[in-house]
Image: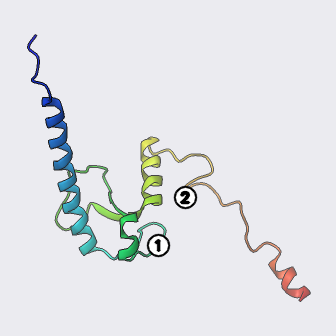
Amino acid sequence: MKKDPPGRLDTVVARARRAREQRERSYREQALKLYPWVCGRCGREFTRANLSELTVHHRDHDHDNNPPDGSNWELLCLYCHDAEHAHHDAGGKVAAGRGSDAPATYKPFAGLAGRLRKE
């Protein structure tokens, strides 16, 4: 068995990482030009000061599918992006008590009418 020269694997890995970072930079810049700086899920707005917290999500989860019209992208904040990938990584099954399929149980205005009448 022939051995690879020392450092060859490191060189290959470094080259692959640089290529990925360059590709990400390219579609991120395009997406930020195409879309308003707002999270597509929670509606949080972003400025230059916190723009690093806004990510580009690939709707079909294929990071190599980057059409120039941006049809496979949506801008998501870090939290919504993590939640989307947690949902996808779970095989599309929403964890109990989470997601749009789970009924809301907290009632923030319960008893409000009674409180307003007392004052």
Describe the element under mark 2 as helix, strand or loop. loop
Check the picture and name the quadrant holding the C terminus.
Answer: bottom right
Crowd band around label 1 with a 10 angstrom C-alpha radius: few (<14), some (14–19), many (20+): few
Which image quadrant is residue 45 in?
Answer: bottom left
| Three-letter amino acid code at the position of disc 2 | Ser
Residue at image position (42%, 47%) is 88
Q: Nearer the viewer, mark 1 or mark 2?
A: 1
Q: Is residue 38 above or below residue 57?
A: below
Residue at image position (41%, 68%) is 40
Residue at image position (31%, 50%) is 61
**In the displayed image of the protein, which residue is found farthest to the right?**
118
Give how far apart the Cα atoms at labels 1 and 2 are: 16 Å
102 vs 17, left or right, is: right
Check the picture and name the quadrant holding the N terminus.
Answer: top left
For label 1, the residue is: 43
| Three-letter amino acid code at the position of disc 1 | Gly
Dot label at residue 100: 2
Residue 75 percent coordinates (x, y): 35, 66
Which image quadrant is residue 9 in?
Answer: top left
Q: Earlier in the sequence, mark 1 or mark 2?
A: 1
Residue at image position (12%, 30%) is 8
